[in-house]
Image: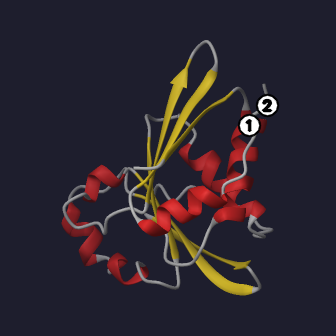
Amino acid sequence: MQHFKTVLHDEAGTAALGASLARALAPGLVIHLHGDLGAGKTALTRALLHAAGHAGHVRSPTYTLAEPYKVVLGGEPVEVIHFDLYRMASPEEFLDAGFREYFNDRNICIVEWPEKAQAVLPPPDIRVFLDISPEQGRDVELQALSDQGSRCLDRLKFAPNL
């Protein structure tokens, strides 16, 4: 399993990692974000979406569960769907909402709190773990779990601010 680890010392580091990820994305990717409240899952997604060309406000989909964004990657329009499953009471809510239809080879799906729908959620290509480190900022690990995830991490060009 291919993986990448780094330390993000501040919000600028989180924004830089989001921008680097945006440049490495490809349609069809599924990314699961793991971390406690305040670990930076939404901040990373916001930075990624802005770097991918979304000019508007990026809301946390805490209450809507999903927010779609249209961006252009490699000259092609792509929809990035940002899921936040924190408030979901059961995996059936995910199915009842019809969210599985978004998971295809044309869209990119980024899922916060995937453990809330683990039984029905399509498997990730990449898992991102964000942990708050009081001394350093945030510890981050990206794990590729598929060939497509490995190709994405191969394209990732990130040098943290040291």
Left or right of residue 129, residue 95 in this image: left
Residue tagged by mark 2?
161
Left or right of residue 23, residue 99 in this image: left
Mark 1–mark 2 CB contact (< 8 Å): yes
Please tell me which residue is depicted at 25% across the width and 77% down the height of the picture.
96
Please tell me which residue is depicted at 74% across the width and 37% down the height of the picture.
13
The circle on residue 13 is 1
Residue 20 vs residue 88, the one in the foreground: 20
Q: Is residue 117 above or below residue 37?
A: below
Quarter of the image with the C terminus is: top right
Distance Cα–Cα, label 1 vs label 2 = 7 Å
Q: Horizontal and vertical percent for residue 26? A: 59, 74
Which quadrant of the view contains residue 15? top right
What kind of residue is marked 1? Gly
Q: Horizontal and vertical percent for residue 150? A: 50, 60
Please tell me which residue is depicted at 78% across the width and 37% down the height of the picture.
12
What kind of residue is marked 2? Asn
Which quadrant of the view contains residue 154? bottom right
